[in-house]
Amino acid sequence: TLHPTVVTYNTLADACKTSGELGAALEVPELMTHRAETSRDRALLPDVGTYTILISTVARKEKKKYEDKSSKGTSHNNSEGTGGSSQRRRRDVRSGGEKDPDMAFALLNRMIDEGIV
């Protein structure tokens, strides 16, 4: 039987980040902690990679919004870029809203409190 590893969970968090699902990404550390407690495997606890993914999820700026304005002259970028931007904004709203630097700092403090850095 295959069991998830910290790499598996970090990949899940990264997939949530990529798809704009902030809420789902923020649930990953709790999943990891629960699995670590039930299996008594401390190697499954969130690590620097986990928190790096989460911090970049909540703190990164939305470059696509600015690229759309500058690429209106080219039809290839305009048709591709505009749809992607509005689709991403919809996902952001579903997943908890705009990117939040304050949350990024809270995650950093949590990482420090847990002795990860």
Image (cartoon, rainbow, N blue to C red):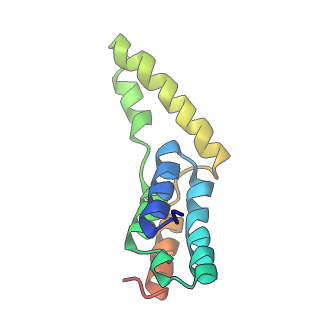
Residue 37 position, x and y percent, is 61, 83
Please identify the residue farthest to the right as the structure is shown.
94
Residue 14 position, x and y percent, is 45, 54
Q: Is residue 59 left or right of residue 74?
A: right
Please identify the residue farthest to the top as the structure is shown.
75
Q: Residue at x 49, y 75 (%)?
A: 44
In this rendered view, identify the residue nearer to me: 38 or 116: 38
Residue 25 position, x and y percent, is 55, 58
Q: Quadrant of the C terminus?
A: bottom left
Q: Is residue 113 above or below residue 55?
A: below
Q: Is residue 40 left or right of residue 65?
A: right
State the image quarter where residue 92 is shown: top right
State the image quarter where residue 59 is shown: bottom left
Q: Residue at x 32, y 13 (%)?
A: 74
Q: Quadrant of the N terminus?
A: bottom right
Q: Is residue 55 above or below residue 62?
A: below
In this rendered view, identify the residue nearer to me: 10 or 17: 10
Q: Residue at x 40, y 66 (%)?
A: 52
In this rendered view, identify the residue nearer to me: 10 or 22: 10
In this rendered view, identify the residue nearer to me: 89 or 117: 117
Q: Is residue 29 above or below residue 71?
A: below
